Amino acid sequence: MARPIEYISSIDDSKDLWKVAVRCKHLWSVTSSQNREHLELILFDSKLDLIQAIVPSYLVSKFKTQLELGCSYIMQNFKVSSNDFSFKSTDHKFKLIFCGSTFVKKVQLADIPLNHLKLIGINAIIEGKYRTNLLYDIIGGVTEISQAQIIPDNNKSKVVFSLTDLSKHHVQCTIWGKLDVQLNEYYTTHKADGSIVLLLMNARIKEPQGNYPLNVSNAWNGTKLLINDLSIEEVKNLKEKLKDDMPTLSSSSMQMETTNTSVFSDLDKFVWKAEVLSLSDIAYLQTETTCVTVATLEKFECGQSGWYYDGCSECTKSVTLKDGKFMCYSKHISSEPVPRFKLEVLASDGKLKYKFVFWDVDCVKLIGKSALQMKLDLMETGDFDPLEFPYELDVMLKKELAIRAVFQPNKASLSVIGFKADEVLRTKIKERFKCEEHTSKIVVSTDDTRDDMHTASCTPTITTSEKQSHDDPQTDPLSITADYDPSVANSALTPSKRSIPVTVEELDSAQLSSTKIIRDIKLEK
């Protein structure tokens, strides 16, 4: 005898053998920093109850072609887990996780409506009648664009505008990333549509904080934007009733706003969402930090490889030869590897020295030649040795730069994600350096016969252990190696603890080279 169909409201963790008749309200893909994809979807049944479901990475290939937005299904057999998301797409206590025995069959279910919105009115938002950890569907007419600009740290855009509904109250709304691009393209291609009514599905409401007002925004990949979609009755009704209360907006108004409100200086863009720190301050960091500093490039460090690595032709990751094919860790296949710069450079600010890793894009800017061209030139002369650093690289040295880099506590170097050579900008950054409360604890070597600069220890007692290897990206997915992608430099990684720099006496007794003065010290795992 077949199991009966049960309602979403009945689902709990007492069993796995749930069988439900549902429609897919929302479906989206999430890719992790390790380039793993999983699917998330919101389901509802004939009683209009909602529940979120997850398709894990190892099952994406099985279910991706079976699941379709707006379709109805009979689904059976799930792992049931607590709905513990920081921002919940539904208020159900549980979520469903697909497993190997999950059964999905597409069927026509007329008793489940085609659309179901979890709407909250703008008046209710203003009155605080919402949960900060719950995502909502919000409909509103655009009354004013107050900002349209480029976000400096990742070169993505955002738009800030006002939304209103039949309550005639207004709330600020911010959309960014793909949704902003979608809105901008709509303005460009639908100039005759006049006023705009938006439906944000799975949107986040942010409480006012300090100078920041109450705000509605998208929540990463999980938010869907529909613009003037008259197939949705609520959008059609609102557009008709608000037609006299909303201005006619066009692509030219969007461009004008972009021009008038993009007022960030070069300095503001460069230090956006970064800590401006001297090398002395950086030496005391204990958590992952994007920082901006000023230092002079002194010499190249000889690491585990030469001056370049064999990269993928489709991305910046390194490749290995497998079954006669060059493959990167993202599974891209290359007929031939592409040489890409990876240079470890010791830099100094006159007090301390620190090792920085410069990647391909920034090296090309500094050197004026790609790694491929440099390798080809050397091969033509018959003087190519992959481990010999070409003399042309020296053009990078003796330059004082403002450097934007990522500090990770279990790494022996800072990974560079940008630089500026402008003297005025460098001066302004130096002026922003924090007052060094521990200046008395920094000791600068007066021995001209040594190339070392040291840091003294702080008072706290610490325990150290052997530092983790960062040479194998397969065994250490957080390593800053040739596979490091600067575009995800601000991702939320779990910081590990790090020891405070050891005393000058300890450094002298260990006879450490300048390569290991600051960072190549034993770490606490």
Image (cartoon, grey):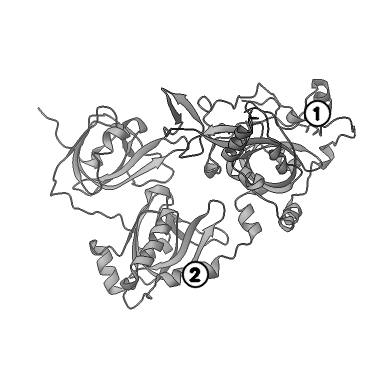
Q: Mark 1 points at which residue?
A: 503
Residue 17: image location, x then y, percent:
22, 29
Closer to the chain start, of discs 2 and 1, is 2
Would you call the spot at circle 2 few (<14 residues within 10 Å), some (14-19), or many (20 or more)? some
**Horizontal placement of 33 versus 466: left or right?**
left
Residue 341 seen anywhere in this rendered image of the structure: no
Q: Which sits in the foreground, 96 or 114?
A: 114
Would you call the spot at circle 1 few (<14 residues within 10 Å), some (14-19), or many (20 or more)? some
User: Quadrant location of the N terminus?
Assistant: top left
**Horizontal placement of 177 versus 411: left or right?**
left
When asked about the image quadrant of residue 340, the answer is top right
> Residue at point 14% right, 34% down?
4
In the image, residue 445 sits, relative to residue 274, either above or below, namely above
Q: Which sits in the foreground, 77 or 406?
A: 406
Type of the residue with mark 2: Glu
Q: Which sits in the foreground, 451 or 243?
A: 451
> Residue at point 42% right, 58% down?
181
Residue 365 seen anywhere in this rendered image of the structure: yes
Looking at the rendered image, the disc whose residue lies closer to the viewer, 2 or 1, is 2
> Residue at point 81% right, 34% down?
453
User: Quadrant location of the C terminus?
Assistant: top right
In the image, residue 443 sits, relative to residue 186, either above or below, namely above
> Residue at point 82% right, 38% down?
442
**Horizontal placement of 258 versus 222: left or right?**
right
Residue 138: image location, x then y, percent:
35, 59
Q: Mark 2 points at which residue?
A: 257
Type of the residue with mark 1: Thr
Q: Is mark 1 on a helix, strand or loop?
A: loop
Residue 161 — which label? none
Q: Mark 2 and 1 residues: CB-CB less than 8 Å, in contact?
A: no
Query: Alpha carbon of mark 2 to alpha carbon of mark 1: how far?
Result: 55 Å
Residue 256: image location, x then y, percent:
49, 71
